[in-house]
Amino acid sequence: MKMIRAIVRPEKVEEVVDRLADGGFVALTKLDVFGRGKQKGIQIGPTRYDELPKVMLMLVVEDGDVETVIDTVQESARTGSFGDGKIFLTEVEEAYTIRTGEKGI
């Protein structure tokens, strides 16, 4: 199993979530976050914004579904501009459902 953390623009979240659901990936967690990338924020006129609002989507998927999910997120979140976001992939050793105690996703 892998955990995919995708940080995307707020205006692209619903499109990403809908595309993931269309692909059968409905279980996820959404978090409002703030941050900056390599460009250290953005300058608009005289005002500098050091941190920008983003949304982090977290999903745990089977190893065989990783590429499908990553491709779906990239295609639906991409605008082609700086600040489109980032995707992080980590190994998940085990997962448990609290209500049932069931192991696995």
Image: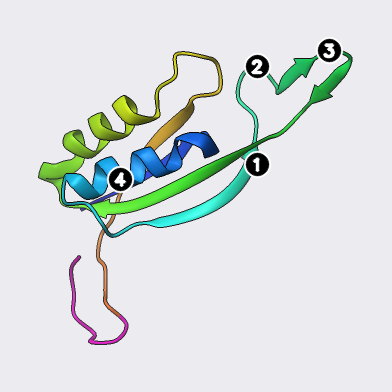
Q: Amino acid at mark 2?
A: Gln
Neighbourhood count class around disc 3 (C-alpha, 10 Å): few under 14, some 14–19, many 20 upward = few
Q: Split into 4 quadrants, where in the image is the C terminus?
A: bottom left
Under circle 4, the secondary element is helix
- Which residues are the magenta region? 98-105
- Work out whether 86 lies above or below 25: above
Foreground pick, 67 / 82:
82
Q: CA distance from mark 2 to mark 4?
A: 29 Å
Residue at 26% across, 40% down: 19
In primary-sequence order, the first of circles 2 and 3 is: 2
Query: Which one is in front in this view, the residue at disc 2 or the one at disc 4?
Result: 4
Which residue lies under the disc numbered 2? 39
Q: Amino acid at mark 4?
A: Asp
In primary-sequence order, the first of circles 4 and 3 is: 4
Which residue lies under the disc numbered 3? 45
Neighbourhood count class around disc 1 (C-alpha, 10 Å): few under 14, some 14–19, many 20 upward = few
Mark number for residue 34?
1
Under circle 2, the secondary element is loop
Residue 29 is inside the magenta segment = no
In primary-sequence order, the first of circles 1 and 3 is: 1
Q: State the colouring used for the structure image.
A: rainbow
- Work out whether 23 lies above or below 45: below
Under circle 3, the secondary element is loop
Mark number for residue 18?
4
Residue 89 seen in this snapshot: no
CB contact under 8 Å: marks 1 and 3: no
Q: Amino acid at mark 1?
A: Phe
Percent coordinates x, y for residue 51 in the rendering: 72, 33
- Work out whether 36 lies above or below 22: above
CB contact under 8 Å: marks 2 and 3: no
In terms of image quadrants, where is residue 72? top left
